[in-house]
Image (cartoon, helix red, strand yellow):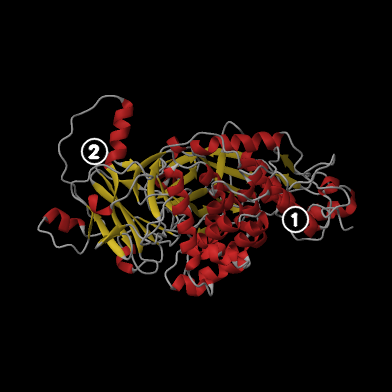
Amino acid sequence: MKLILIVVFLTTHLFASVFAYEYESVTESIYAGLLPVEVAKYAHKKDEQSGEVVQQMVDANVDVVKAVQTVVKEWSSCDDTYASVKKGVQIAPDRADEIVAAVATIRGCHCNAQSFWARSRLEQRLRPRINRALVEISSTCSCASAGIEAAMEIVPHRTEDMIDAVLVAKNRAERTADSIGQIGQIPDQKFWGEGLIVTKDTNLVRNTDVCKGDHNEMDEFVPRDTWRNKDTNDNNPVFNSNKTLGQHKLICKDEDKVDGQQQDEEKKDEKLIISQYIEGQGSNQALELYNGTDKAVDLLMDNYQIEIYFHGYEFPGEIIQLKGLIQPQSTFVIADANAAADITAAANQKVHGLIFKGADAVVLKTGFNNSPCECAVSTVASAINGIDKGSNQKSISETKKDFIKRIEQHYENTNIQTTIVDSIGRILLNDESANGATNEINKQNRRDHPIVTDKTLRRIENTCKGDRIEMDTFTIDKEWRSYAVDNFLDLGNYDKQDCLASRKDLLLSEYIEGSDDNAMIEIYNGTDRPIDFTNERYILEIYNDDDEDPEQKIYLKGKIDRNGVFVIAHENAEKDLKNIANQTTGELDLKNTRAVVLKKVVLPAYQACYADISAWIINNDLKNITYTLKPIFDPGSGPVSDDDPRDGDDGGELASPN
C-alpha cells in the first residue's frame, strides 16, 4: 500500500511540476530550457493546434522529426497525426521518410482509425462503400498509415522511400550491441551524468578498458562508469590518442576462448562498441564505433542500426541503417551531414537525423527480426490510397494506375523479392482496360520511346541517388549528358562523389548503345562498402519495345569496390572493350531499349513484409483498393447500430453530404 501511495505521489508531483511553469508560448518554453515533451503537454492543455505546434518547435530549433513525433504522441488523434505529419513534411520534404518512420514506431499509438477515415471521407464527399478506395486498419498500424497518407499529399514521388522506411521501422534489428542513456526515462537535469561527464554539449570518449558494450538500454545509465570527457587531462597515452575522432585502441585483459556459435556471436557483439560520442552545438553530432574483433564487420549485411530515442520515449524516433565495413581494431564514424568540417572530414558515413540532445538515448543494434510486419500491407495500401487525395475526380487517375503497376512489379514475385536501386528510361504503362478510339489515341500518346538513338550517356557528376521510380517521365538532361555513338573515352571511370545524404546508392553511371554489338553499361558504387554482386544478388533488367516485362534479365557476377566501377559489355563487343569489362553477356542488347533497371534482392528482414504485400496484391483488384483488419473500438466512442461500424450510422455525421 505504501508503495502504491509513493508511486501516485511521485506521478502527481511530476505532472504538477510540469504545469507549475508559467507557460506563454512554445518558442519561449523551448528557449527557457524545457524539453519538447514538456512543452507539448503545455500546448496541448492550452488546446493549441498540433500542426502549428510542430511549426513553432521547428522555429525554436527543435529537429523536425523530433517535433512531429513528440506532437503526435501527445495529441494522439488521427486528425492530429495527419496534420502534424503533413506540416513536418511541408517543412522538410527531403526528410519525409524519416518523419513517417518516426510516427510508425510510436508504441501504444492512440490514433483512432475510425475517426481518421471518417474525416477523410467527409473531405472527399464520397461514401467509400460506393466506389472509393478505403483502407481500414487496426490501432497497431493506424499511425503509420495516417502518416504515410499525409506525406503523400506533399511528396508523392518519395513514396517508395517512405514505404521502405516504415518497413525498416517495423522490423528493427533485434539485439543490442551497445547503448547510451536509459530509454523510457527523462533525467532530472535534462541530460545524463554529472560534472564534466555528461551527455549535453560535450565530447565523451570511452574508457580504454571498456571492451564490452552496454547490452541493456533500459538499465540505469551512469556515464562516469565507462566514459570520460575529452578535455580530461590524463597521462595515459592510449586515452590521449583516443581523443582524436576516428582513432581508438583498447587495453583489455586476455579472455579465455569460448566454444559455440551463440557464445561467439555474443563475443562479437561485445567487442563492437560506441567508442566516442559528440553532442555539440547545432548539427555537430557524431558517433564513433570501434571493432575490437579480429575480423572485418559489414554493418549492412549484419544489419547494424543506430536507434535514437527522444527524451524518455520507449520507441525510437530515428533509425539509421549503417552501411560500410569496419576493419579489425578500427573505427567507423557516423556524423551529421551538416556538422562542422573537422567532424565530417573523419566521417565514414554522413547522415541526416543524427539528432541527440542530452536527454535522448542512443542504442546500437544488430541482427535480423524475422517476425511478420503487421503494417506492411496497410502502409502500401495507404500510399496507393493517397495518390488521388484531395482531387475531385471520381475515376482512378493515370498517376494512380502507374503507381499501382509499380507496386505490383515490386512485390509480385514471392520467391525473389527485389527493390529498385536505379533506372534509365521509362517502362511503358498501357491501360489494358481502355476501349474506344479516344482511349486508343491516349494509349498511343503514352507510348514510350527508346532511351537514346546512336548516343552515349554519362551520369552528371553531382548525382548521388538512383532513380528508383522506373515508370516516371525520363528527361535525359536532368541527370545525364549525351555524347556521340561509340564514345568510349570515359568508360571505366566515374568521379568520386561526396554526397551529403543518408542514402548513397549504386548508380548506372554510363550507358553506351553502341554500333554493332558494342553495347556497354557502367555501374558506379557510391555506397560506403564494397559489394559482391554474386552473393548479394543484383539483377539488371532490359526493357525493349513496348513490353511491360523485361526482355532480358542479367544476373550480375563479381565484385565492385567502394567508389569503384563495374562494366557490363556484350560478349561480341570489340576486343579492347571486352578487356575493360568486368562481365560480358550475349543478353546486353540495347537497340530499341526503353528502360534499364538495376534491382537488388531485399534483405531477409524485409521478406516477411514483402510476402504479405505480394499475397494481398495477388488476391485483390487494386483498382478498387480495400484492406480490412478487424477494427478495435474505444468503448463508448463508436456508433452502436446494425450498420457497418466502420462507416457510421446511415444519415449520421458520416453520411455523404451528396
Q: Position of residue 198 (x, y in %)?
A: 29, 60
Q: Position of residue 397 (x, y in %)?
A: 78, 54
Q: Which residue is mark 1?
A: 120
Residue 353 in sight here: yes
Seen in the image, is 561 located left or right of residue 416?
Answer: left
Quarter assignment of residue 452: bottom right
Residue visible at 47% across and 53% down? Answer: 11
Kind of residue sitting beneath label 2: Asp
Of tags 1 and 2, the one toward the viewer is: 1
Q: Which residue is mark 2?
A: 294
Seen in the image, is 498 located left or right of residue 194?
Answer: right
- Vertical arrangement, residue 131 with respect to residue 58, above or below: above
Seen in the image, is 392 located left or right of residue 554?
Answer: right
329 or 427, which lies in front?
329
Label 2 packing within 10 angstroms: few (<14), some (14-19), many (20+): few
- SS at mark 1 in the image: helix
